[in-house]
Image (cartoon, rainbow, N blue to C red):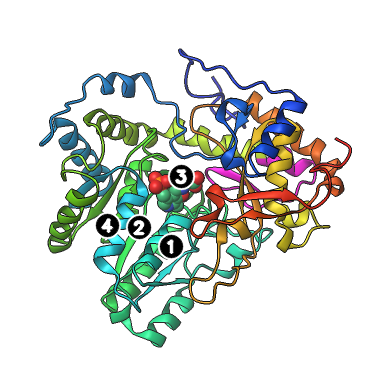
Amino acid sequence: MDEKMKFMPEPFKIKMVEKMGSLDKEGRKMAIKEAGYNTFLTNSEDCYIDLLTDSGTNAMSDRQWAGLMMGDEAYAGSRNFFHLQSVVREYFGFKHVVPTHQGRGAENILSTLTIKPGDYIPGNMYFTTTRFHQERNGGVFRDVIIDEAHDPAAIHPFKGNIDLNKFQTLIDEVGGKKIPYICVAVTVNLAGGQPVSIGNIKAVSELAHKHGIKVMFDATRCVENAYFIKTREKGYEDKTIKEIVHEMFSYGDGCTMSGKKDCLTNIGGFLCINDDELYTKATGMVVQFEGMPSYGGLAGRDMEAMAIGLTESCEFPYISHRVNQVRYLGEKLDAAGIPMIKPYGGHAIFVDARAFLDHLNQNVFPAQALASAIFEFSGVRAMERGIISAGRDIVTGEDHYPKLETVRLTIPRRVYTYAHMDYVAEAIIELYKKRRDISGLRWVYEPKVLRFFTGRFETINEELIKGY
Ligand code: F0G
């Protein structure tokens, strides 16, 4: 076996399969129209290849399924909690673990306990639910990611890094006392799944701690981040993924985690905290909103699957295939000149919708239109990550105009093969030839919060893809 093959085959065998959707062209046209040109509102069974998200869409292993059968569904003190706690402590190194139903449950607890109205929370680019919880508690989010992250074409090995000058400027402006923590996302989802280097994490940690500011990680895709460190950062080539994850988190004070990503499960999350006092408060909150601190809104079996999934996720053949599958799709599209965020990230390819649909202004929602057109054309379900996701300024009510206007082709873990990626690439390359025929969109219904989930649109022209 030649392990130096450019793209090694999937590191798993398939023993259970699921039928894919098979709507014809007319069916897809009707489905996307009925969904108000919002892929979030289409039905799963109407999709051919579902690249909406990598969240909770993972295929679990036989070991995880076996673990489900070992669920201890006691109300308190479930053995699966203790297993999860010991794995998280071993891999992440944090002292306390509070399970939550998913990542945003942990974000809710962290934000509520630490943010006072008028506080500032710096972060390496926003994430929708993360910023929502910060703002809900009266905080002001401040983006301190390096400038390169906002430029789809800028090449940087660690495009998720924090700009220390931006962070320092905020400290000078408002003082450390008004900054309860800095949120360091590893990797940065909306920047294109871009990683943060250990060097940067260390420097951020030093600066933050000097001013009494905590470092809280968004650990959601931390294993993907560790893979990039191993393959891109000098001195880490020979370390294991587990060692790198552990080192990354050794510079922080805790993390929020969506287990639905790098724990390879379909549900679950947790909050980690080193501070004893904060942990005690977190247990007080978790009982109000999630459940006992030993289950946090999860069944015992879910915690078991998460514990096993985290260890599998850190195995090199798994994570190497994972990231390379994303690159495989990226390289196919790149060869045909499709504009994308580069370098390719850990969980998705982000098509640059502004460049793809260069005849549309951002105020007719190019990324929303492109995601709809991809669905209509191929049955591939993707997601808008642009002006609709960015929402409105909480004070002025004006739309945020993010520099990145993208469609995310998100690859679920262990679900699709390279052959599926070939189909996706071919469909998008064909659609690119018709790009000028794609119509912009306008609002029919705009929800007040997290509007991308349930908003509805109509086409400005008569058809979404003219003549298709
Ligand atoms: N942080 C990041 C970086 C995320 O990507 C997500 C979810 C969360 C926090 C919230 O976690 O969904 O378990 O409550 N991202 C999903 C996505 C929804 O499609 O990117 P959750």
Closer to the camera: disc 2 or disc 4?
A: 4
Residue occupied by mark 4 = 109
The disc labelled 2 sits on which kind of residue?
A: Phe
Query: Which one is in front in this view, the residue at disc 2 or the one at disc 3?
Result: 2
What is the spatial separation of the Cα atoms under label 2 and label 4, in whole angstroms?
14 Å
Q: Is residue 345 magenta?
A: yes
Circle on res. 217: 2
**Image location of residue 74, percent across then percent down:** 13, 30
Residue 198 seen: no
Figure quadrant of the C terminus: top right
* Circle 3: element type: helix
Residue 295 in the image: state x and y as whole percent. Answer: 20, 39
The tag earlier along the polypeptide, 1 or 2, is 1
What is the span of residues highlighted in magenta in the rendered image? 330-352
Q: Give the residue displayed 86% in from the left and 46% down from the top.
A: 437
Q: Is residue 413 left or right of residue 135?
A: right
Task: Determine which of the numbered discs, if any, sits on residue 224 in the image.
Answer: 3
Most extreme residue toward the right, as rendered? 467
> In the image shown, does 383 or 453 lie closer to the viewer?
453
Nearer the camera: disc 1 or disc 3: 1
